[in-house]
Image: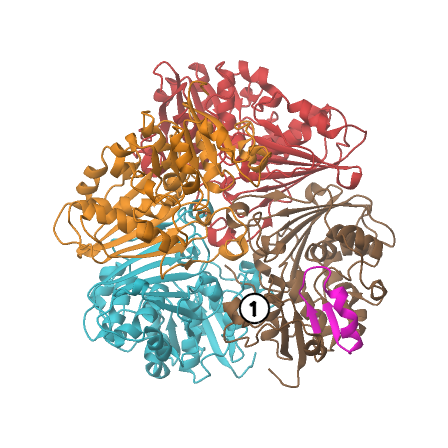
Chain colours: A brown, B red, C orange, D cyan
Amino acid sequence: MSTSGIKAGIVGGTGYTGVELLRLLATHPQVALSAITSRSEAGTAVADLFPNLRSHVDLRFSEPDSGALADCDVVFFATPNGIAMTMAEQLLTAGVRVIDLAADFRLKDPVEWADWYGMVHACPDLLGEAVYGLPEVNREDIAQAHLVANPGCYPTAVQLGFLPLIENGLIDTTHLIADAKSGVSGAGRKASVGTLLAEASESFKAYAVPGHRHLPEICQGLSAAAGGAVGLTFVPHLTPMIRGIHATLYARLTGETDLQALFETRYGREPFVDVLAAGSHPETRTVRGANTCRIAVHRPQGDETVVVLSVIDNLVKGAAGQAVQNMNIMFGLDETVGLDTIALVP
Amino acid sequence: MSTSGIKAGIVGGTGYTGVELLRLLATHPQVALSAITSRSEAGTAVADLFPNLRSHVDLRFSEPDSGALADCDVVFFATPNGIAMTMAEQLLTAGVRVIDLAADFRLKDPVEWADWYGMVHACPDLLGEAVYGLPEVNREDIAQAHLVANPGCYPTAVQLGFLPLIENGLIDTTHLIADAKSGVSGAGRKASVGTLLAEASESFKAYAVPGHRHLPEICQGLSAAAGGAVGLTFVPHLTPMIRGIHATLYARLTGETDLQALFETRYGREPFVDVLAAGSHPETRTVRGANTCRIAVHRPQGDETVVVLSVIDNLVKGAAGQAVQNMNIMFGLDETVGLDTIALVP
Amino acid sequence: MSTSGIKAGIVGGTGYTGVELLRLLATHPQVALSAITSRSEAGTAVADLFPNLRSHVDLRFSEPDSGALADCDVVFFATPNGIAMTMAEQLLTAGVRVIDLAADFRLKDPVEWADWYGMVHACPDLLGEAVYGLPEVNREDIAQAHLVANPGCYPTAVQLGFLPLIENGLIDTTHLIADAKSGVSGAGRKASVGTLLAEASESFKAYAVPGHRHLPEICQGLSAAAGGAVGLTFVPHLTPMIRGIHATLYARLTGETDLQALFETRYGREPFVDVLAAGSHPETRTVRGANTCRIAVHRPQGDETVVVLSVIDNLVKGAAGQAVQNMNIMFGLDETVGLDTIALVP
Amino acid sequence: MSTSGIKAGIVGGTGYTGVELLRLLATHPQVALSAITSRSEAGTAVADLFPNLRSHVDLRFSEPDSGALADCDVVFFATPNGIAMTMAEQLLTAGVRVIDLAADFRLKDPVEWADWYGMVHACPDLLGEAVYGLPEVNREDIAQAHLVANPGCYPTAVQLGFLPLIENGLIDTTHLIADAKSGVSGAGRKASVGTLLAEASESFKAYAVPGHRHLPEICQGLSAAAGGAVGLTFVPHLTPMIRGIHATLYARLTGETDLQALFETRYGREPFVDVLAAGSHPETRTVRGANTCRIAVHRPQGDETVVVLSVIDNLVKGAAGQAVQNMNIMFGLDETVGLDTIALVP
């Protein structure tokens, strides 16, 4: 770990996105982990909470004291929603780049944000400055950004799947359907009956069908691509596994095109989007631990409904990996540095 | 077990639908299990292959000798596709009722059957006589039937979810979407790399997106309800659990209605279809081992897309339980006899 | 459900042993469920908390008001440790039989109890009266008992495995080893990080190696059988599954015997202990949902170490099923009534 | 990948140890993968069989043609037992180092090998030359070796747990007990009913209690450490997870010692053995994907039985990772190069 590397801090590193950031940053050749804060675990060695990090991370959790954080080059917020918006301004003023893995800066409209997140936004002035950190869309803006809103897990998988179709005006965007399935780590590392192994294993269910917070985020991104409002039905499901999101996307084609070529062209230069051969079915396990989004596009029975299958690891390309990718871009590094984990199979 | 009960035989009882039939029939108060055949396991005690049946089932597998089967009142085929069609006629002639849990008699059109199943149908003459065994649609015909085609697992969950909407002309039937998720027992009890725990656990994938054999079966049923051809995109997925199907159904509403009342009315007298309260999300585990289909209906964000969530145990309401339900109807018993298993939770 | 049946009440029915009791009692032909209490869920319909019970259980949770409970013939405590001991006396005085599924009455010595459970025993006077509810040992006493201490899950599996050897003086009882593995439902239905699917799935660990509360309970039972103190090393492990305990027991043989015949003779008349053929390996899934203990005995390589494999469903023979078995005995019913669930396989 | 690096070949790379070797070697900075053979998959791109390797491995499987292999610096055998012994001699003659991940060269006695593996050994002459590749015991010999027998998964976990006690003469070695639990990937990537998700999930069982092939291998290693024959009862179990071995070891102490200090001293300089603090319980997930063995030592209740808990990833420290570690030693590299994967948690 180069002493001249990027000094990185993490706020709230006791959850799953936090430990995943630690895993990625600990072996990142250009990063020096300098602070990780947690009010509840202050004083505890990180490796005592996460023994997989023994011999890799020597830090202890510290109080979220902005003194230590202000000394960083970049600070990641791996906190619950509503924390980053109270601390970001001070850090930005101190010249620190901020990457928020929570939702505080994802929506441009503070009223809509308040509606979905149930609290008033603490710093609406920063919403305009924040860049939505989906590199496949905003790479250039990210490179200039001081404040990046790292996308949600579902929004990453869904947007990457729909974008080639929408950007090229090939589908009816008034009735999009995103049927998404997530492993339970998406619910976070907090005590809860519903995600106990004894409750969530050997079962499958939809949840939040009336409305999920990722709906407006996805709509915002797809509308930008469509150049106008889109209509989306988004149904998330809980799958009995730890990691992985599988988004199955449906839309009606409004024109003829070579779907396979469309996707291959759109993502041909993207290091972390892998378009599978025609007829393929991506498995979430092939991206477990990796920052890759694997996509396949189908047109079943030759009908006018196109089906896109898009898989990511919700904690990597859907959270910590994408955050590191954004950091690489923000600091002018090769975008793939520190992100070469090969998925564990089996 | 009454000696004056229904004498039941099972052909091909070494797979998952077979052992599930055994579980249900062994405790059915009106049934005497009299024969179970398996060419590969002839001579083996059933309880040696399935130790959960120790002290409950004393039979040994026998050669599929139609002598013993012809002596039964009812014979269940829990065989691969293509077996029942070669044996049914002889049994029917001998006065035996036949319930086929495989696909041989599900499609009315032998040409379509041959296209999807890759073999010529051995007894197309019986297709007209066979009754499709979905009691919630065909109860009266089943009561008179000698040959019942037990529905597929996906078709049961999907049809029960769409029927109230289609029967009442409330949705656009040209663009139906059924996104279905199944546990791996649906793939059967046969050695296969793809369904090894080390392959299928901790992963999620779609499969057979270009075309699955249950597609024409579902379309046949929904078209009958619609009074005309329907258009369906059907995408099955493999979920890392043993039992359970969750079908998430999407359609555009073409008229206004009280969706909750519609479903409650349609299924109010059905013993095995349970409509949940508005806003609910059924979990597959609540039907594990039970013959119940649990359904919830949603209209997210008040938009015109209706979402139906329908869950069954693929081996019970999706196979063996429905077969017993059909037998009960065929023999004039209370439809629920022997089907009172409460799902194991947790 | 006969109105003249046994009126049963449950205190604390919101946990896993509670819902399992409900599953078993709801279909028990001689039992009328008359009250189920829960302070936290008072007023909630039981079937709203446990949708698998919809149409099977119509009760609502009520406040733990001893008026309603005092009207029962039998009251089951499916509570945390320390509750039954504060309520039992009043119920017993009212003529109610009490079966405690928690640990309050399992140890005879109140000082030892206080050491392991961290609280003073509230009614040590009842400890002498309480009968330890392991029917395979205490059937006659249970039949006369008013207060039954239902055994722990590990103690059931371990004692049933060791008893034939110890009762016949065939092993060195100073160095017994019980290596036990449990599914996570043993930890109960309470919010906890350690048993989240994302934490406990795809992992295996030992816990409580320095000392587990079931250790003194097992030692008490084995010492009684041995006619003197025994030495036991007991190591429990957490296994990534919902239900099931597998105890692997090790002891040194001190004499020659036909081990297979020993076990078959000991348990030949026991309805819920199933000794497998020599050379077998019981699987926990074969007892999932069933009240059976399956046992196999081995002598690897002909050496002097005997290995016993003993499996139960921790929530059935290890808790609710054994409680119903005890109730059947206490009320003079056939011991197996209501306990004929066949394990779900697969 | 340096063109001047070690040219590595893999024979039989279609199984789980093969894909794991590929994962590790593909990112190893000193290795150039030059050949991977598989008779059944010759011509197939490796990444088509294992999509997690897309963009990481460009090779195709080739026929096991010793011409290509003979051009390598090192050849790994990730084959079934009995293959390496027919090919090793030719490769060694050609100057290639050979590391066999199967069992062909693990036992020194060809008669014992034939007894356990059911075939005559094809090259008993090489058994003396082969070095048993447990670096924590044989590091110096491995550095000089041309032929390394990579240890089995169970033997690695069990030996590392027992060694400090045996080497110091602290336990009675006549009655050792190793109760070991493995994830199902240990059974390999081959079609099999017993390891289907629908069979092996939600269940736990022992297997091969009468005798497992790893028994003589463990005894050979422990006897060498003890300076005389040891007595071991070894019981393997199948756990419903993909990766991981947890060995729970029992022995009687024959002398007093500071167990914690003993283990910490023995492994203080070992890069891949991590002794946890006193009172700890290692979890297999903390080594998932990592080459680490985590160990904790206990003396429950202060009795004379010592309990050692030892966990590894069966495919890494128990197979491919240890093979790479051996390769590093054989070629004079830093032993840890290419082996810095941090375990995925959660």
Q: Is residue D43 visible?
A: yes
Q: Toward the viewer: A76 or B307?
A: A76
Residue sitting farthest toward the right: A228
Residue D31: where, in percent of width, then height?
Answer: 51, 78
Total labels: the figure holds: 1
Find numbered disc 1 in the image and state the secondary structure of the residue it sits on: loop
Q: Is residue D47 left or right of residue A332?
A: left
Residue B87: where, in percent of width, then height?
Answer: 44, 24
Q: Quadrant of residue B111?
A: top right
- The quarter of the picture where the N terminus of chain A appears is bottom right
Q: Quadrant of residue D17?
A: bottom left
Q: What's the chain of the residue with tag 1?
A: D
Please check the rendered image and state whether residue A317 is part of the magenta-colored stretch, yes or no.
Answer: no
Q: Toward the viewer: D270 or A33?
A: A33
Which residues are the magenta region? Answer: A75-99
Residue at mark 1: D57
Decide: is D83 above or below C285. below
Q: Is residue D127 left or right of residue C115?
A: left
Residue D92: where, in percent of width, then height?
Answer: 35, 78
Please check the rendered image and state whether residue A85 is part of the magenta-colored stretch, yes or no.
Answer: yes
Residue sitting farthest toward the left: C256
Q: Is residue B146 visible?
A: no
Q: Is residue C35 left or right of residue A150?
A: left
Decide: is D16 above or below B254. below
Residue A340: where, in percent of width, then height?
Answer: 60, 70
Decide: is A73 above or below B154. below
Q: Quadrant of residue A97?
A: bottom right
Looking at the rendered structure, the kind of residue marked 1 is: Val
Decide: is B271 above or below D264. above
What residue appears at the point 33 percent right and 31 percent down from the top-left corner?
B61
Label 1: few (<14), some (14–19) or many (≥20) C-alpha neighbours in 10 Å: some
